[in-house]
Image (tube, coloured by chain):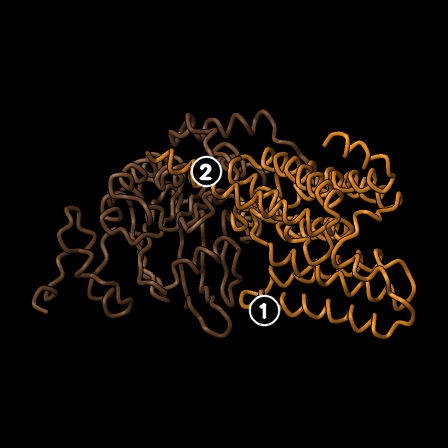
Chain colours: A orange, B brown
Amino acid sequence: MGQAIGEALQFAFMRHALLAGLLVSVACGIIGAYVVINRIVFISGGIAHAAYGGIGLGYLLGFNPVLGAIAFSLVAALGMGTVQRKTKERSDTLIGVMWAMGMALGIVFIDLSAGYKADLMSYLFGSILTVPTSDILIMVGLDAVILLLVVLFYRELLAVSFDETFATVTNVPVNAIYLLLVTMIAFTVVMLMRVVGLIMVIAMLTIPAAISGQFIRDLKWMMAGAVILGMCFTTVGLWLSYSWNLTSGATIILVAGTAYLLSLAVKAGLMRKQRS
Amino acid sequence: MMGRQTNLTPRPVIEVAHLWAGYGNEAVLEDINLTVYERDFIGLMGPNGGGKTTLLKVLLGLLPSTRGSVRVMGQPVATGRKHIGYVPQQVEFDRNFPVSVWEVTRMGRLGRRGLLHRYTAEDNAIVERVLRQVEMLELRKRPIGALSGGQRQRVYIARALATAPEILLLDEPTASVDPQVSNSIYDLLQELNAHITILMISHDVGAISTYVKTVGCLNRRLFYHHEKNLPPAALEQAYQCPVELIAHGIPHRVFPVHEGARER
């Protein structure tokens, strides 16, 4: 096995893939923890799918689709975040509509654009094996920005996540903090798009944090646990996909999903042991 | 008990005048007038949907009033609410939430400093003091989800106290705890009342009759006369407070015996 890994790592694309997996795991674990404790998995899914509209626009107007995805996911994040905060009823319906419209816009934009669209699938299902050096650098930058923001606003993010009403009453700028959070989710979604694809972003955003949160009752350590788990899942998934010749994004998700189901069983076992 | 408030210099901490509020076009509160004086301990009752929680929301600046004025410590609610320590009603919450007793209590200090400021040694000293006050200091490292309902309520009171409030505002503080635990929480509130004005919403008539200083009844309109005894006839007619039910068999009566109530 060790030999196989050594052999795989001789290829530059495998080193890049491994590095990309490790880098997204950092953002995933940290932001995923907030997604899980705030129960905004649905918004995160919406942001991811709406990003597809930006990819379509990139194809249509001939600029880098990743930039379009960044712009669309940011707009979607702020729009959905505002809807969630301001409308008392049916915010999930509105978010669902924005989710679908973003995706549909992407498809129509691509219909309208001319030429061959070979790597379109890579945005939907991920293409960790073709991550260029420039994307690695973007990932390093986004990780750094997310880390810095979370360190600076850790107290406020925790207070708003735990009890929004109390935070409001004590004059914490709840709206600004919430929009900061959805913005960071948008950045994370764009990074993840490269690795597992838009469709499976939710899984990588939630599974490591969900497993970690079952066993750790401190947010900082929950994040740390989620980062480490994410790194394990991407690395193991990557290795399995290399040796069995499978789609890397899907393999990573299956590894993570299996681990999650196992963790539920372990948790149930622990609970039973505690009771007896 | 009755004469106590006249011994105090009556400094008003909350002044509500001709307040109307509601949701959409529907008024839930009609022409509310309420002056809360320093060191009072008010128990506010009323039927469900009578506007108790709506009144709290207006006092906390969470819901705008449609008419009338609200002042807290002589200021509009947006700034005055920093003098209010809010203890929310216990609702369903995520038992897995990764936060400790200490961290929750310290959230009471967050609004006291601007963004980007770390908690200071003073903050930590205050958090330690209020946790000791509510007898939860030993459990400070516990995750909040591992506490019992009564313990959690004490932590929420500590969090409110950490804001260094002039007024404590409590929404059904014993809604989800058993009677013995309730009493210990009311004892704590009574102790705190030596320094802090308390306004409490409660269905718990036993507690209202035993622990509070004055009683109000809210059903769209507020009936409150800075007294502990409420005339039942007026209450029944105008406020539909269930007088017979609540005054029955309680050692310290809130209400004088209601003539005719038993015949019905």
Query: Along the line of sight, which residue is nearer the eye, A44 or A263?
Result: A263
Instruction: Have a look at marks 1 and 2 and say if they share a chain.
Output: no
Query: In terms of secondary structure, where does tag 1 sit?
Result: helix
Image quarter of residue A84:
bottom right
Indicate which disc residue A93 carries: 1
Chain letter, disc 1 residue = A
Which of pointers 1 and 2 indicates the residue nearer the eye?
Answer: 1
Chain letter, disc 2 residue = B
Image height of B248 relative to A37, above or below:
below
Q: Residue at x 84, y 47 (%)?
A: A131
Q: Residues within 10 Å of mark 1 (few under 14, many from 20)?
A: few
Percent x, y for residue A109?
Answer: 82, 71
Q: Residue at x 92, y 69 (%)?
A: A115
Percent x, y for residue A236?
Answer: 69, 39
Indicate which disc residue B39 carries: none
Q: Residue at x 74, y 38 (%)?
A: A22
Image quarter of residue B149:
top left
Percent x, y for residue A120?
Answer: 82, 62
Query: Along the line of sight, which residue is nearer the eye, A130 or A87?
Result: A130
Q: Is B139 positioned to the left or the right of A167 in the image?
A: left
Image quarter of residue B238:
bottom left
Q: Specify the quadrant that holds the C terminus of chain A.
A: top left
Q: Is residue A86 visible?
A: yes
Q: Is B27 positioned to the left or the right of A180 in the image?
A: left
Query: In terms of secondary structure, where does tag 2 sit?
Result: helix
Image height of A266 relative to B53, above or below:
above
The residue indicated by pointer 2 is B144
User: What's under tag 2, amino acid-wise?
Assistant: Ile
User: What's under tag 1, amino acid-wise?
Assistant: Thr
Q: Residue at x 60, y 62 (%)?
A: A86
Image height of B239 relative to B106, above or below:
below
